[in-house]
Amino acid sequence: MNHIDMKKFLNILLIYIASLVGLNANGATATTPNDFIEQSVNATLNTIKDDPSIKMGDMVRISQVVDSFIASYVDFKKATRLSAGRYWREASPEQQDALANAFRNTLLRTYAGAFTRVEPSTTMKVLPFRGDVNADDVVVRTQLFRRPTSDPTIMDYRLEKTPTGWRIYDINVENIWLIENYRNQFAQQINQNGINGLIDALNQRNKK
Amino acid sequence: MSRRLSNAVIAALLSLGMSGCATTTSSPSNPNDPLEASNRVVYAINDGVDKAVLTPIAQAYEAVTPQAVRTCINNMFLNVGEIWSGVNSFLQGRQEDVLTTMGRFLLNTTLGLGCFDWASANGAKRIPNDFGVTLGVWGIPTGPYLVLPIIGSSTTRDGVGKLADTYVNQFEIGQTIQNIGIRNSLYGLEAVQRREALLGITETLDRTALDPYSFVRDAYLQRRAAQVRGAEAEAEHLPDYDNFEAAPADDKALGIPKKE
């Protein structure tokens, strides 16, 4: 037991030191997937923690922060395409755009909802990278601690390497992957009301 | 209390089983959910009870109790649950999980007084476990998805597992606390605390899910499948979207070996 816990503890310590060194050496240009998540998610967490209006639940301000997070780091088109699955190819380019924009707003609300729960003591721990460093499609595993001594939440990010750097296209909260979850709801709506029905349903949700 | 709850669960299983037979004519959107029609009815009732009764209580509790106290109470209930989680890890042959869970229990009970989760802070995350997962590891299929009254998402297998879990929980607390008044207050507090911990999730769910019923169902089934695979295997498991999408647009080497 001691051996296992000690190993985990040392690992965490090492990542922590590595992340500090990495931040200082690399500045804003993240090269490894872990650095990318460390910097993008932590920057957003810190913006929210430092903004007093956000703690009071100012959804407009939270949406602005999350919107810039999605614009900079999230490939929502890919997330939409994978959620729509085989129906994506049946959609016209206009429908694809409308669907991606509607789903982008849904993602925005999902992230915004999560960020309203951020507290001053909320921290993120990036777990050791397990995959192939040279791969283009990777997973970064993290744990989110709302408070230092509370039960952490699993938050994994699935990334793809694009010409403009890493982009998040799927997230896993406590073993539930976002796209895997949405694709049944998408299929259900499309089967009932077609692709336009799905777009309308998403937009109606977003207005609430 | 124990018997009444157990009877309610059995009655629910039976009634759902029977009503399901009559309503499976329309093709279900998820093959794991042949009883969708009757499940949706129970889901709607649960949701109504939740919004009318449980959510207001949990919100009041959140309003009057400081965050530190709520975290502490939550950790205490989770800490008591570790023993049964450890037993289940043992029954599943996951010896490393047994050690982690028991180590967590010892550390959090002594240094953390049950109130602080020092083990998580040091990288040993809680491994939630129950008898439904044990049955799954032993090879018993989930059976149809079920929505049980009050309890919510379950499957035939997990419903049976829940009977064992409830019995052990009652036995553990019943042995430690003889005063019936205090004991029942504790059950109440545990229920309120559990609901409070989920407040943020249900708010997000109401705002974002196209169909909350199918969102909750798919999330539950995904999470249970992940628990049966186990933490080690789970780290290497990724959803494969290529199979779902006709075009192999993302046929790239994954950083992590794909399962199957």
Image (cartoon, helix red, strand yellow):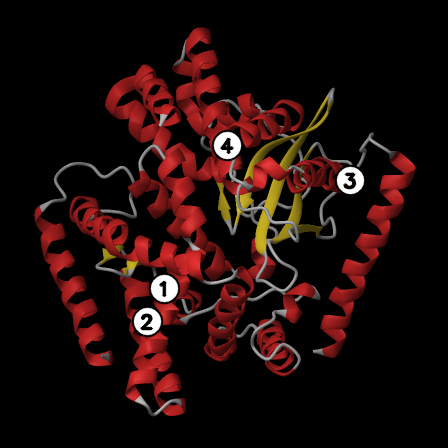
Q: Amino acid at mark 2?
A: Gly
- Asked if marks 1 and 3 touch (Cβ < 8 Å), the reply is no
Q: Is residue A115 above or below residue A127?
A: above
Q: Chain of mark 2?
A: B
Q: Kindly indicate whether the residue at mark 2 contacts the one at mark 1 (C-beta within 8 angstroms).
A: yes
Q: Nearer the viewer, mark 3 or mark 2?
A: 2
Residue under pointer 2: B188
Q: Nearer the viewer, residue B137 or A129?
A: A129
- Marks 4/2 in contact by CB < 8 Å: the verdict is no
Identify the residue at horizontal 37%, vertical 79% (top origin): B169
* Residues beneath discs 1 and 3 located on the same chain: no
- Crowding around mark 1 (Cα neighbors within 10 Å: few <14, some 14 to 19, many 20+) is some
**Amino acid type at image mark 3:** Asp
Do labels 1 and 4 touch, CB within 8 Å?
no
Q: Secondary structure at mark 4?
A: helix
- Callout 2 secondary element: helix
Instruction: For mark 1, name the chain.
Output: B
Foreground disc of the pair 4, 2? 4
> Looking at the image, can residue B153 be seen?
no
Q: Label 3, on which residue?
A: A35
Q: Which mark is residue B192?
A: 1
Location of residue B122 (image quadrant):
bottom right
